[in-house]
Amino acid sequence: MTRTILIVEDDDVVSETLRVYLANAGFEVRACRDGVEGLARALEPDVDLVILDLMLPGLGGHEICRRLRAESTVPIVMLTARTSEDDRVRGLELGADDYVGKPFSPREVVARVQALLRRVETRPATAPATIAVGPIELDVWSREVRVEGRATAVTPNEFRLLEALKRQPGRTFTREELVSRAFGPDYDGADRTIDTHVTNLRRKIEASETPRHLVTVHGVGYRLVS
């Protein structure tokens, strides 16, 4: 099945370059230059991934990312000239799945898109359809998280991280193990990336400010307990 990629980028040269490379890789590609239009088109149900510039007319990339995550789990690759660690972390905190700095290699962007879609589509063949630990339940096939029976919106990366922890409840995982198990060996992420995802998850699945389920093992990593 052909996957559809939406490029939200106001630089026509960058947009066209990405369009050509992605189309040559077998993707259907759509593009727009305005942030308001980009948000509306990113919410279309047949869009499989969004490449999102940070600096856009009408509505900025961070705000688009925030609003998208309130309504959708579509994977987001942020594309921007801002490459400081704070900018990367802010994008991840808002729900972006990957971050590519300008200038970039179009082939690398295509590779990152392919890797992200593989991570989203991976399903363990013999895994149970539902995994429950305490009040937290994951439906592997619908990709839904429920806390005390209520559906809770999470990003694709947050879902994969929570799924990796729930497969072995009570076990302490190092950050490196979580990167490998949740995102795969080709994921270009750092320790602080995992910390950011854990912080976001806690806001969604914990009933109090003191974590009771997704706990930190200081000097090692994280574990999920019931």
Image (tube, rainbow, N blue to C red):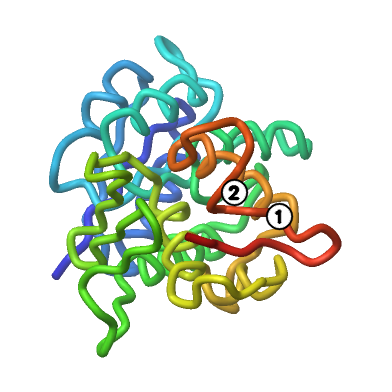
Q: Residue furthest bottom?
A: 126
Alpha carbon separation for disc pair 2 and 1: 9 Å
- Residue drawn at point x = 38 percent, y = 19 percent: 35
2 and 1 marks in contact (CB < 8 Å): yes
From the top left corner, tell me how far across and down residue 158 is, in percent: 46, 52
Left/right of residue 145 with respect to residue 107 in the rendered view: left
Kindly identify the residue that appears in the image at 71 percent across and 55 percent down: 216
| Circle 1: residue type | Thr
Q: Residue at x 46, y 60 (%)?
A: 162
Picture mark count = 2
Residue ID for mark 1: 216
Which type of secondary structure does the marked residue at label 1 adopt?
A: strand
Residue 149 occupies which quadrant of the picture?
Answer: top left
* Residue 153, placed above or below residue 11: below
Q: Quadrant of residue 64?
A: top left
Q: Which quarter of the image is occupied by the N terminus? A: bottom left
Determine the residue positioned at 48% across, 29% down: 11
Q: Earlier in the sequence, mark 2 or mark 1?
A: 2
Q: Is residue 11 left or right of residue 87?
A: left
Q: Quadrant of residue 87?
A: top right
- 39 versus 46 height, above or below: above
Judge from the rendering whether residue 50 lies leftward or rightward of residue 111; answer left or right.
left
Element carrying mark 2:
helix
Q: Which mark is residue 203?
A: none
The residue type indicated by label 2 comes to Val
Expressed as whole percent of the image width and height from the top left, the position of residue 43 reads 22, 33
Q: Which residue is mark 2?
A: 198
Give neighbour class at mark 2: few <14, some 14-19, many 20+ (Cα, 10 Å): many
Q: Is residue 99 visible?
A: no
Percent x, y of residue 154: 38, 44
